[in-house]
Image (cartoon, grey):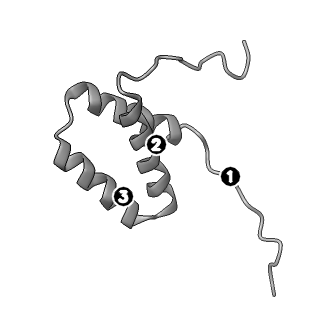
Amino acid sequence: MGLFSRKTNDPPANPQMAELGREYAIAKRHGDRKAMNRINRQLGTSEPSSADRASFQQGRDAYDAIPPIKTRNRRKGR
């Protein structure tokens, strides 16, 4: 029992696609449409296999599992 007891260490079939999925999730969280469209174009031209798609999704899910940081507005009222 611990903080990381539920973590799975299944390596992706294609680490490059997993990294691309992670970049896509980062761009989506930050609202970077330019980067999202660039990644979508890369995926559209290469026609990924089912293993590549699974690796891409695994990369997205790995980043989406990290909760966003709650920030405090320290300059409130200025």
Figure check: 75 above or below 67: below
Q: Quadrant of residue 6?
A: top right
Identity, as a three-letter code, of the amino acid under mark 2: Arg
Q: Quadrant of the C terminus?
A: bottom right
What residue appears at the point 46 percent right and 42 percent down from the top-left corner?
22
Image position of 54 (left or right of 75): left
Q: Work out whether mark 2 precedes mark 1 in sequence or the reverse, and give the earlier one.
A: 2
Q: How far apart are marks 1 and 3 (CA)?
A: 21 Å
Residue that carries the numbered disc 2 in the rendered image: 22
Identity, as a three-letter code, of the amino acid under mark 3: Met
Query: Residue placed farthest to the top in the image?
Result: 1
Front disc: 2 or 1: 2
Q: Distance between the residues labelled 2 and 3?
A: 11 Å
Residue that carries the numbered disc 1 in the rendered image: 69
Q: What element carries label 2?
A: helix
Where residue 70 sits: x, y (%)? 70, 55
Q: How far apart are marks 2 and 1 (CA)?
A: 17 Å
Q: Is mark 1 on a helix, strand or loop?
A: loop
Residue that carries the numbered disc 3 in the rendered image: 36
Identity, as a three-letter code, of the amino acid under mark 1: Ile
Figure check: 36 above or below 25: below
What residue appears at the point 41 percent right and 29 percent down from the top-left corner?
15
Which numbered dot is residue 28? none
